[in-house]
Amino acid sequence: MYRRPLQAAVRNVVHAAAGRTARGQVLKTESCCGAPAVCRWTTADPPQWASCRLLHTATQLSNVKETQQHSEEEVGAFTKFIEAMGFTAPLKYNKWKIKIAALRMYTCCVERINYDEFFEKCSLPDTLNSWFLIAQLHVWMCLVRMRQEGREGKYMCRYIVHSMWEDVEQRSKIMGIDAVHRKEALKAMTETFYAAIFGYDEGILSDDCVLAAALWRNLFNRQCEDPQQLELLVEYVRKQMQFIDSLDGEDLLLTGEVKWRPLLEENAQSILKEELVSSVL
């Protein structure tokens, strides 16, 4: 019952804001599944993530299938406050479906990765921290992809990260880590995660040297002396990002299913030929 007055106030604010056309803002009316139309602001800001990226060979991928970009919304302070309280404008898909898809996508980052192969090929110790470093790399790749899907994608990103921290906490409890050390470990992992996100973002938008440096700092914890291991991981990240960019955004929002390329492949660039042929057909 306590939600109804607040929801009515939100609707009044939305209707009042719709009439302020003198400020030069453009209103875009959308209708989803017979629901009332929702007014959105559109801007000319360019997308944050480029669809075409370079592989480790620095070959320009100009013919790769591009992912449809969504314009950023202009959100005011009141809207941010309302969203922080859990009252948001209707999304394109049901929120519970997006939450389930987010959990499934995180599960793909955990259950569809051969962690033993990473431990062996990258000379990483078989510990909870090493597992987390590999998992966060794949979670980051999912976040990069889903942030291209507008408000629905960002909403999904929030629950992918939430699922990750819930899983890490449960695993630490199963391992018998006491509450004090578990709290300290989670705090350190949180700092590591956001530092890694920043470094990986810079690396994926730059050349292979910057990406290799980010992997050396975060995944290898500054303890890798074998350049072939760094080359292997740079190739792995580039081909995974190229592959996940080719997946349909609506399918990802509704299913969360992600199939990862293997760590070792004879010809990593073969996926480019497959995607190019499928896009032409």
Image: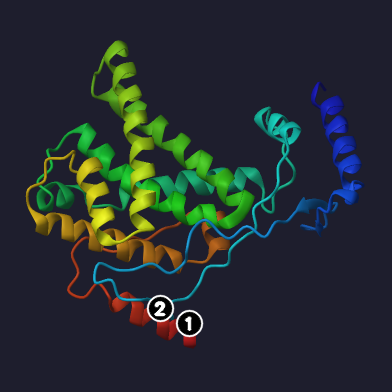
Crowding at mark 1 (Cα within 10 Å: few <14, some 14-19, many 20+): few
Tell me which residue sits at (67%, 60%) in the image: 44
Q: Amino acid at mark 2?
A: Glu
Circle 2 sits in a helix, a strand or a loop, which is it? helix
Disc 1: which residue: 279
Above or below for 129 versus 263: above
Q: Is residue 251 visible?
A: yes
Which residue is more in the foreground, 55 or 179?
55
Which residue is more in the foreground, 276 or 42?
42
Q: Quadrant of residue 62?
A: bottom left
Is 224 on the left or on the right of 186, as rendered? left
Disc 2: which residue: 275
Tell me which residue sits at (34%, 49%) in the image: 200
Is 109 on the left or on the right of 220, as rendered? right
Q: Amino acid at mark 1?
A: Ser
| Rendering coords of residue 145 (x, y %) | 47, 56
Tell me which residue sits at (34%, 45%) in the image: 199
Which residue is more in the foreground, 50 or 260?
50
Q: Quadrant of residue 6?
A: top right
Above or below for 47 versus 138: below
Is 162 on the left or on the right of 272, as rendered? right
CB atoms of marks 2 and 1 within 8 Å: yes
The outermost residue toward the bottom is: 281
Above or below for 40 versus 261: above
- Compute the Cα span from label 2 to label 1: 6 Å
| Rendering coords of residue 280 (x, y %) | 48, 87
Which residue is more in the foreground, 68 or 50?
50
Residue 57 bears which disc, if any? none
Q: Where's the N terminus, which quadrant? A: top right
